[in-house]
Image: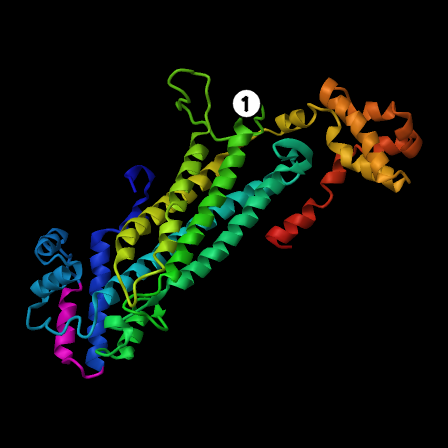
Amino acid sequence: MIPRYARPEMVAIWSPETKFRIWYEIEAHACDAQADLGVIPRENAEAVWKAKDVEFDVARIDEIEAVTKHDVIAFLTHLAEHVGSEEARFVHQGMTSSDVLDTCLNVQLVRAADILLADLDKVLAALKKRAYEHKDTVRVGRSHGIHAEPTTMGLTFARFYAEMDRNKARLLAARDEVATGAISGAVGTFANIDPAVEAHVCDKMGLRPEPISTQVIPRDRHAMFFAVLGVIASSIENVAIEIRHMQRTEVLEGAEFFSMGQKGSSAMPHKKNPVLTENLTGLARLVRMTVIPAMENVALWHERDISHSSVERGIGPDATVTLDFALNRLAGVVEKMLIFPDNMLDNMNKFPGLVMSQRVLLALTQAGVSREDAYAMVQRNALKVWEERVDFREQLLADTDVVAALGVDGINEKFDMGYHTKHVDTIFARVFGE
């Protein structure tokens, strides 16, 4: 990803220096295991560790690869330059390139997942704080973009919290899904390497052995991982869209923080645009863009081909770096977000009392009116509120059929706002625990 949307910690996971360091550790641990089995001399295995403090020369590896046209061979050649050709002659014994490449990729994805999990914790903390802060801040709920019934701003934040909490569980499962390694040799049969080597390397690298690999680790694991990243990106957009809607001039129930000296438009000095959440919508598209290629990587020819390789070189860093940036941006937006409770009430009262229509409808049916007749009685009064901006309660009080069924006190009682918020504590307990 471009530096504008990248954070250093995640970028470092995908740097050539990190990749070659992981490759080195895989090879060195494999040598140790081979020595334990008596396959190679112990002194050769120990010699490989002479390079443990070496900073591998990326330019030199690239120079060798320009000749060999093979990245792993180029690295092994460079490693031998540090260790000594005689001492390094047993490095990569019985292994194939994918043993190194696939195990390394999964190490990187696990490390990336750990950063993303920490990012999700930041988002969850911000959402929880704002949810409790505005637990009882009443706003109108909307369906199809139209006023529906009262809810609270706290419930809005709590809903997003629950969604992100599910995403955390999904990411934990995805992390586990890709936390496998394979040191199984050509076509995955262990013909030239003992399974004990794989077990040792995986243990040292924080992975578990892949139960059955071909020459590559099965890509359904990676498809699931990137699919989860796509779902998380969609949830980010879900929050972002809500904030963008709230910041519209006609709504203005919430807004991104606008810092001192910030400018909203080069042409119109009055503008305060929701640029951060619009950016999050765009970044979510980029992350989701990686999901289909990851799924298409599942189907490979026989025991392997490299059609997946070029894809993963792009989507691995792109998806994780972008999502890392987006989650941190979202946490900051939520933490600093401005909330306007008075505007929420003003919006609800644009059509006075109209949001209580269902309660009146239900009361009429409970009073013995058929549902069809009750609906017609409520709707004829509700439509006048839409068309003439009159008060819904006053219309009902002037409707002799409604008064006959409910009485004046019965009508007035149906306009208690607390009726709609009486179970907020129950919902909060479900979301956040007792």
Please tell me whether residue 358 belongs to the stretch shown in magenta.
no
Which of 258 and 24 lies nearest the eye of the viewer? 24
Q: Position of residue 74 (x, y in %)?
A: 12, 60
- Which element type, helix, strand or loop, lies under badge 1? loop
Could you say which quadrant of the image residue 357 lies in? top right
Residue at (76, 33) in percent of width and height: 356
Which residue lies at the image location 51% right of the left edge and 48% below the top edge? Answer: 124
Image spot of residue 195 (x, y percent): 29, 78
Q: Which SS does the magenta portion mostly show?
A: helix
Residue type at mark 1 is Thr
- Considering the image in quadrants, where does the C terminus appear? bottom right
Q: Which residue is mark 1?
A: 249
Name the spot of residue 268 as percent of width and height, x first.
42, 15
Outermost residue to the front: 301
Q: Is residue 316 visible?
A: yes
Is residue 50 in the magenta section? yes
Image check: 169 left or right of 99? right
For the image, the number of numbered tags is 1
Q: Position of residue 133 (x, y in %)?
A: 59, 39
309 and 296: which one is in front?
Answer: 296
Compared with 36, 352 (above or below) is above
In the image, farthest residue toward the bottom: 38
119, 357: nearer the viewer:
357
